[in-house]
Amino acid sequence: MAKTELFSRQASGGMFTINNEALNTGNIFWVCSLTGTDAVGYGQNPDAPFATLAYAISQCIASNDDRIYVMRGHAEAVIAAGTITLDKIGVSIIGMGTGSARPTFSWTTISSATLLMTAASTSISNCIFDVGNGITGLTSGIVISAAGCTIKNCRFLTSKAGTWIAPIQTILTTAGANYLTIDGNHFVGPALTTTTVSAGTSCICLVGGTGIQIINNYIHGWFTTTTGCIYGITTLTNNVLIDHNFLGNQTTSSAAAITLLTGSTGLVSNNRLGVLTGTAPIVADAVWWLNNYYAASKASAGVIL
């Protein structure tokens, strides 16, 4: 008998599926706000999905390698602290669709609204996060406090056209977010307008953590002139890797794109940095700088640091 990674499963209600067990051996759930219902008996096939990601997470089993597929066109609001809390170890959230048809999560109502990643080895991919939806002083969009988490290939809308209200930071970590990976994401606000800019402090704010990787991201926005796109505060970040990112700080007289807490260690390499003044877009005294380029004004060629 030939060996195979494919096995049949029977979902509630009698539906049989074939699953590639090399991807996961846990439960598979489906979510779609357009057609879904948050109730027992739903969620196990795409014809009868759950309505919300928050409910789907509640049905997962920790350390079971469960997967949640969030379907094309799904929309869900983040209206309070922990509206969505990824609190089951090992759960993967996978957005379906392409471009603007990917599942979209919008922050509304209050400035403390958050999506929390509190369980280890969880991941989110291929989703859209609208954290610039017009809430004045939104503190943090996504807060990560567990080890081994991943955010990959997502789009973040970081300010709102016409108002330029931006979150203080889009992603915030705690000292428990060891070995976090932020990979291949697109953080961007609307095109330049003549309205007043309400700049965020930073895009990614690191509070401690070991082995964090911030790689292959595009960040373009309006951040504090001396902190920049990636900012480390309060607790040392050790063995960080910030590599192959494109970072632009649009705020008038911006001097920094990356600022790490004094004494933080690791590598800052192969980044392309845009600021509007000065010669020191990286502020990090105890990391290696390798092959980074920057420009201190628009329409000018970059120079190596």
Image: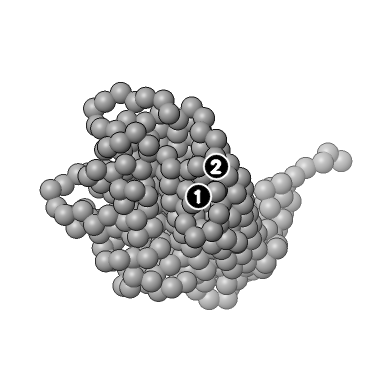
- Report how many numbered discs are placed on residues in the image: 2
Q: Is residue 99 above or below residue 140?
A: above
Q: Is residue 171 above or below residue 155?
A: below
Considering only order in the chain, which callout, 1 or 2, is on the residue closer to the N terminus?
1
Q: Could you tell me which quadrant the C terminus lies in? A: top left
Q: Secondary structure at mark 2?
A: loop
Count neighbours of disc 1 (C-alpha within 10 A) and say few if under 14, some if 14 to 19, many if 20 or more.
Answer: some
Instruction: Name the residue rendered at 47%, 48% in the picture.
Output: 260
Q: Secondary structure at mark 1?
A: loop
Q: Is residue 52 above or below residue 151?
A: below
Q: Which mark is residue 262?
A: 1
Cβ–Cβ below 8 Å for labels 2 and 1? yes
Mark pair 2, 1: CA separation: 7 Å
Which residue of the protein is positioned furthest toward the bottom in this rendering? Answer: 39
Q: Nearer the viewer, residue 117 or 287?
A: 287
Q: Amino acid at mark 2?
A: Ala
Q: Which residue is the site of mark 2? A: 286
Instruction: Name the residue rendered at 41%, 61% in the picture.
Output: 141
Residue 216 seen in render: yes
Q: Nearer the viewer, residue 273 or 57?
A: 273
Q: Nearer the viewer, residue 233 or 11?
A: 233
Q: Is residue 258 left or right of residue 207?
A: left
Expressed as whole percent of the image width and height from the top left, the position of residue 105 reads: 39, 60
